Image (spheres, rainbow, N blue to C red):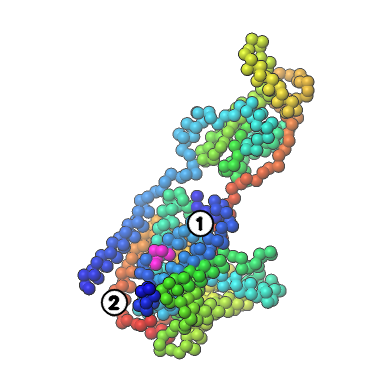
């Protein structure tokens, strides 16, 4: 059955309409969970607010379980979902830079849009920064191209890389998530309250 | 009218509830479109569009930009641009409903506004650069990647948060 | 205050257990049987009912009336197809029915697909293969082209004592014969019918229909940030 649009059960013209509604829900959920506040987001790195970790892990666990059940019930063809390619080197380098950007700027791209949506100027500045970053990357691309394309493993999943079944991955991830929720609650109680 | 009280300004959803809703949204997104959520791709499209208007030959010659320019199709006509417009509107809706929507600059009381702006810009530049390098950001690569068990998703998530913790010490004065 | 905290804690513990349990459930739930396949016993049952057969008269009528809902599929090889075929038929050789290029013609729900070959043995086998993949609206021309030739192109005159309906049918067949290129008045063709249609040469006019593309497209999913 699904995914609906790639299988043309729903015509491709709907793609952009659906995109707007998905975006609406995405923005609403992020804002309502407090993702428009950089001080709340960064709290995860200093231990005074673990909202990011809780939302992020819960979302990942729920969608992993849900997608697997849907595909087992025959509503969704797991193999037709988009799996981004793994370029080992560039993924690690890029992610290190992103982590640095996260503690420096206090946002990630999605959350900065959220912040800009409710009129936070630091969110807007962050978005401008993002665009400058894209320009810098593109101008430097000839220098970076080799690293950018190095160690391409293709669109692999954990099943391909480590041979763990999807079900086992989900169970392990869920258990790790629940332990993380518990541990962060304990830590949260010990750290002094930071006003934000 | 009590909902508009000052008390509600910082009343956010329970994070687990927020996460559950986000999970359902991810499932719906994969079920309908076969792909996940994203954000940084829209910034790239905007940049490509803007530069293509200003300096078309430069864009078409560039080895990176030229990948995203198609004939007879505006670089802005992508799924992510529409999604991001929705994100802006959705965030405003939620913020307006709880009285959080207004122009302001948020920062720790210990630092100046100027410092916050500079660091936000710097962080944005780094994040923009990194997201292009890693082919996706926290939502596009990490969260959506996790949902389909992509190796890249796990890798990106672990490294982003690991790097965040590693560098957090050096920026503590900005936040706490 | 303390009591309330305890209640919240209990709630979280319950939610955590529910989450882990649903994840563990994945390990023990093998999923429903694949909906894209039909089990062998069901295919067999379907094939025994014989509801999927069209006889030559039905097909001749559909061709003459220009019925747009049928898709005639010639399962013989392309050389035989090039010699003669039914008007409007398209050629998908027997061995290629599941190829990516052709499977889209079967995996759809717009047309009644009528499979035929010289006899109906090959088409019956193909029908079983296609039906077991749960493709809908598959049909077989009963007796294949040989039967079609014997009934429509060279119908046997009924004996004088036959009921009137038999004569009606005969007359209809003769009339249809003109449509399919039998010279008027009906020429006596050489040889016996036992040789099959191959002797008719280009007798059955082959008005080639442009292959309509009714493939169920499967776009590659794209994404990324």
A173, above or below A45, in the image: above
In terms of depth relative to the viewer, which is nearer, C132 or A33? A33
Asked if marks 1 and 2 touch (Cβ < 8 Å), the reply is no
The x and y percentages for residue A167 are 40, 56
The x and y percentages for residue C86 are 69, 32
Query: Which chain is home to disc 1?
Result: B
The x and y percentages for residue A18 are 53, 60
Q: Is residue B8 magenta?
A: no
Q: Of helix, strand and loop, which mostly describes the magenta segment?
A: helix
Reading the image, the residue beneath label 2 is A189
Nearest to viewer (mark 1 / mark 2): 1
Query: Which chain is home to disc 2?
Result: A
Which region is colored magenta? Answer: B18-22
Q: What residue is at 66 percent from the left and 19 percent from the top?
A: C168
| Label 2 residue SS | helix
- Do we see residue A96 in this rendering? no
Crowding at dot 2, Cα within 10 Å, few <14 / some 14-19 / many 20+, comes out as few
The x and y percentages for residue C120 are 60, 28
Quarter of image, res B65: bottom right
Crowding at dot 1, Cα within 10 Å, few <14 / some 14-19 / many 20+, comes out as many
Reading the image, the residue beneath label 1 is B32
Q: What residue is at 68 percent from the left and 23 percent from the top?
A: C173
């Amino acid at each position: 059955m699904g995914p609906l649009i790639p299988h043309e059960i729903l015509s491709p013209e709907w793609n952009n309409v659906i995109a707007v509604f998905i975006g609406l829900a995405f923005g609403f959920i992020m804002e309502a969970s407090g993702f428009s506040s950089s001080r709340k987001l960064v709290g995860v790195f200093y231990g005074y607010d673990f909202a990011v970790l809780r939302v992020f892990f819960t979302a990942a666990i729920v969608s992993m379980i849900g997608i697997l059940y849907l595909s087992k019930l025959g509503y969704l063809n797991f193999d037709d979902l988009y799996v981004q390619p793994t370029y080992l080197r560039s993924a690690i380098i890029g992610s290190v830079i992103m982590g640095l950007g996260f503690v420096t700027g206090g946002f990630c791209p999605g959350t900065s849009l959220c912040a800009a949506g409710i009129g936070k100027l630091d969110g807007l500045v962050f978005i401008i920064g993002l665009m400058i970053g894209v320009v810098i990357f593109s101008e430097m691309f000839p220098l970076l191209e080799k690293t950018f394309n190095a160690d391409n493993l293709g669109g692999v999943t954990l099943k391909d890389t480590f041979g763990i079944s999807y079900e086992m991955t989900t169970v392990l991830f869920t258990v790790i998530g629940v332990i993380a929720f518990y541990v962060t609650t304990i830590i949260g109680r010990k750290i002094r309250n930071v006003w934000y | 009218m009590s909902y508009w009280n000052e008390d509600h300004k910082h009343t956010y959803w329970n994070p687990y509830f927020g996460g559950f809703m986000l999970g359902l949204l991810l499932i719906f997104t994969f079920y309908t479109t076969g792909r996940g959520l994203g954000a940084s791709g829209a910034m790239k499209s905007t940049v490509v569009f803007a530069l293509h208007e200003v300096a078309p030959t430069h864009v078409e010659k560039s080895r990176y930009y030229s990948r995203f320019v198609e004939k007879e199709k505006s670089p802005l006509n992508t799924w992510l641009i529409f999604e991001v417009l929705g994100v802006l509107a959705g965030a405003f809706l939620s913020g307006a409903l709880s009285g959080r929507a207004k122009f302001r600059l948020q920062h720790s009381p210990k630092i100046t506004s100027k410092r916050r702006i500079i660091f936000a810009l710097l962080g944005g530049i780094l994040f923009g650069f990194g997201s292009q390098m890693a082919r996706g950001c926290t939502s596009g690569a990490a969260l959506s990647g996790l949902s389909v068990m992509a190796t890249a998703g796990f890798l990106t998530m672990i490294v982003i948060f690991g790097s965040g913790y590693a560098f957090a010490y050096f920026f503590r004065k900005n936040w706490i | 205050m303390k009591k309330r905290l305890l209640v919240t804690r209990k709630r979280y513990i319950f939610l955590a257990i529910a989450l882990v349990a649903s994840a563990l459930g994945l390990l023990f739930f093998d999923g429903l049987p694949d909906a894209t396949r039909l089990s062998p016993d069901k295919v067999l049952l379907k094939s025994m009912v014989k509801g999927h057969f069209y006889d030559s008269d039905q097909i001749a009528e559909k061709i003459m009336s220009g019925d747009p809902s049928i898709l005639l599929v010639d399962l013989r090889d392309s050389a035989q197809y090039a010699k003669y075929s039914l008007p409007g038929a398209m050629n998908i050789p027997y061995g290629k029915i599941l190829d990516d290029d052709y499977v889209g013609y079967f995996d759809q729900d717009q047309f009644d697909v009528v499979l035929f070959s010289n006899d109906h043995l090959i088409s019956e086998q193909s029908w079983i293969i296609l039906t077991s993949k749960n493709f809908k609206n598959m049909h077989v021309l009963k007796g294949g082209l040989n039967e079609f030739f014997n009934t429509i192109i060279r119908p046997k005159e009924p004996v004088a004592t036959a009921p009137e309906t038999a004569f009606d049918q005969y007359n209809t067949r003769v009339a249809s014969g003109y449509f399919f290129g039998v010279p008027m008045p009906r020429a006596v063709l050489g040889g016996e019918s036992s040789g099959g249609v191959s002797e008719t040469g280009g007798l059955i006019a082959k008005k080639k229909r442009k292959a309509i593309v009714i493939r169920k497209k499967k776009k590659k999913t794209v994404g990324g940030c």
